[in-house]
Image (tube, rainbow, N blue to C red):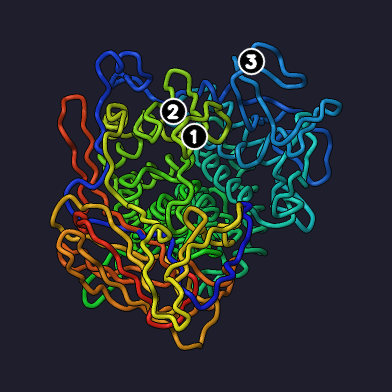
Amino acid sequence: MAHPTSRRTTTRAAAVTAALVLGAGAVAAPAAAAPTAAAAASSPAATTSTQRLANTGHLTTLTTRVAPPAQAGHSTYRLAEEPEVGALWTYAEPAGTAPRAGVTSKDGWDLLGGGDLDPATGHWTQGAFNADDVTRAAVAFTRHWRATGDEASREQAYELLRGATYLQVDSGPDAGNVILWMQPDGVLNPSAEPVELPDPSDSAESYWLARTVWALGEGYAAFAASDDAGDREFAAFLAQRVDLSLDALDRQSLGRYGQWEVSDGDRVPAWLVAGGADATSEAVLGLAAFVEAGGGDAAGPTGERARTALARYAEGVAAMGTPTTTDVGGSQVPTYPFGAVLPWTGSRAQWHAWGAQMPTALAAASEALGDPALLSPAVDDASVFTPLLLASGGPDNSWAPAPVDTSQIAYGADARLQAVLAATGDQQLAGAAGAWFFGANPAGVPVYDPATGVTNDGVNADRSVNENSGAESTIHGLLAALALDEHPEAAAIATQQTRVTARSGLQVVEGEAGTPSVGAASDGTADGSAVVLPEGKAWTGEAQWFSGAYRSLPAGAATRLALPASGGDAPRWASVVVDLAGTTGAPAPRLTVAALDADTGASTPLGDVDLAGVEQGVSEGPGSLRALPLGRRGARGRRRAGGHVDRVRGRRPGLARRGAAGAADRLADPHLGRRRRLDHRLRPADPLTPVD
């Protein structure tokens, strides 16, 4: 991710930007209704119980064959006998009425590479095809072949696996690493524009190496199980490339196994691929498939190496799990990020939906290794965090820690569906997650068409739909459809619950919207000056100020924030987002928080929080935006305060979706209660660092 880095300049003051509120009980999530009979008849989601949702049509449209020129360090299976390898275009846009110079058009789509096209060379500034998509498309076709026996999908899987292994360096100091981009003529582009890291793309391990391992493992499992001798010979080649990948991983991330680092005061594993539990999880999926397929027997020592790597990587991913609650004054209070497995060691604040396959990978590793302990963080993520996410609006691209990027894409929606099925098997919750593809999304329209296999490129933050259908979206739409086909109960829910009528989950109250009052500072300044950051400066390198602003509170000042009505008397919880200092050892300022009931005028103390500094370590910037939990006090909503004040309020989710027959399926989470209308009173007792 390329995020601009910024640093707040306000010092020794509290900055309030928002609050996160959680309520418990009852219906706290989407209520979805089926379309009318007329709409259902014309909707792509209106499939019969025997009709498969998975359609490889559009993904096949994106595929092509390339005969690459001789390039040192790159080879693949039977290249001399079969000089063409599989690839697929990165992007697809609906074709216009007039042809676009130099652009390939097929089946009504313009097929595009990354960056700008040079008409003279036919090259793109990034490339036409990329390893990330080639590998994942290989997984999708492999799964479709295994599920249906479709010979065309077997052929596509075979060619794409040959293309993926061609992108892998086969010798030299970077052996096992992977080139990311290939041009339409097969020429490799190790350094794309704009620059991507690592650069050159085969100079270090990467997300594309992790995804190559995913494809190799699933490909091996499928071809090794075939009765065809040629398929088994190809599987043996794939096992060799697994071994080559392990060589690369052993001298890079796995070489740091057992080492731990500090990230904003927390202990994190040092042996994740590219520092990411998200990247590592995709390698884990491949290693688990390889081990489950008997890699130890069929692949000799490679199997043992794979089992060891699987166990070590799964241990690292599991270490990125988070508790669902924290003890506050003797009560267990919901704590951000509510059981989610965090994706990145460089931030303790950011969770993103795209590529968040950590629960799915942990469940696969638990099965392959016979280690039930690995399943615990996966279950917390899938059964506690995922319902909250769906209740709060769906698979947002980024919470950091407030929901700062509410655009949604198939890569994130598919990851939630796969996680629920793998970690819990909960058909109702899986159906609710899968319904995103069929209209239960912020745009309110289907974004996957089972009749064509087209998956739109996402739902924008303004609820409009990006009607392009590139490789990544198409792949994950197909993977989601394949998963639903294997779980008919979830599929029935997903295809019938095609719009959301109400959501009740996490809510955000912006700190800078609070009512200032005269503070107790010696200079008599008014409390809570609002600080608006310049455009592009809200990202800190590891977290993001909600709405690009915060409220800065000098010592002794106070601010009051009105919370929305709770709709009932059940308890609720809140977290306050604060900017913890980037230094340790100094006396910790303390933030005192109280809630004011807007109906009665009664004030309820919520507690004190010490805003101790944290050790930066490997995190991407000094300081740390943290959503720290407040306590709970019955129906009045006790909360515990934390360092920056970005208020996050929300309920933990219950999900209520209404089906065609009008019956509501409720997926209730017992941890959170209904919200009540409250005001927050935030008073720093001592000088504070900025608060979001």
Q: Amino acid at mark 1?
A: Gly
Question: How many neighbours does mark 3 have within 10 angstroms: few (below 14), some (14-19), or many (20 or more)?
Answer: few
Which disc number belongs to residue 688? none
Q: Amino acid at mark 2?
A: Val
Expressed as whole percent of the image width and height from the top left, the position of residue 472 reads 55, 36
* Mark-to-mark CA distance, 2 and 3: 21 Å
Which disc number belongs to residue 447? 2
Q: Earlier in the sequence, mark 1 or mark 3?
A: 3
Residue closer to the observer: 261 or 583: 583
Placement of 197 over or under 415, stated as above or below: below
Q: Is residue 557 left or right of residue 530?
A: left
* Mark-to-mark CA distance, 1 and 2: 7 Å
Q: Amino acid at mark 3?
A: Gly
Expressed as whole percent of the image width and height from the top left, the position of residue 595 reads 25, 67
Would you say the residues marked 2 and 3 are in contact, meaning their CB atoms lie under 8 Å apart? no
Residue marked by disc 1: 458
Placement of 637 over or under 109, stated as above or below: below
Q: Earlier in the sequence, mark 1 or mark 2?
A: 2
Would you say the residues marked 1 and 2 are in contact, meaning their CB atoms lie under 8 Å apart? yes
Which disc number belongs to residue 96? 3
